[in-house]
Amino acid sequence: MSGDIGIYIALIGLLAGIGILAGAFAGAYFFGKSRAQRDTLNVARDPELLARITRIEQIVESTSIEIERISEGQRFTTKLLSESKTVEK
């Protein structure tokens, strides 16, 4: 009989642990979600931060254009070098 009580105690402890863990994850999720929404609203109200983000977007776009130009130059150079090797043979 005492072995049966031990199994029930272990089962109750396991289920309680799972319930606490699930509650902690749910609480963290909803707390983070509400905090993200508050931060989004604060960003929209701050014109200085909005200007900084706009400048960062412009820098990223110009950098990507320059990287594309560099890659086009490398492709062109590779093409010229491969054609000159085939002409020499």
Image (cartoon, rainbow, N blue to C red):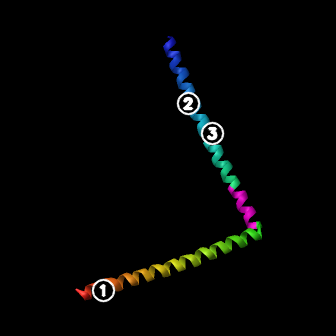
- Secondary element type, mark 3: helix
Disc 2 from disc 3: Cα separation: 12 Å
Q: Is residue 78 shown left or right of residue 48? A: left
Marks 1,3: beta carbons within 8 A: no
Task: Indicate which disc residue 23 carries.
Answer: 3
Q: Residue at x 73, y 62 (%)?
A: 41
Q: Residue at x 68, y 48 (%)?
A: 31
The amino acid type of the residue labelled 2 equals Leu
Q: Residue at x 53, y 16 (%)?
A: 5
Magenta segment range?
36-44
Query: Height in image: 8 above or below 64?
Result: above
What residue is shown with label 1? 83
Q: Does the magenta run of residues contain 43? A: yes
What residue is shown with label 2? 15
Residue farthest top in this picture = 1
Residue 79: image x %, image y %?
35, 83
Residue 62: image x %, image y %?
58, 79
Q: Nearer the viewer, mark 1 or mark 2?
A: 1
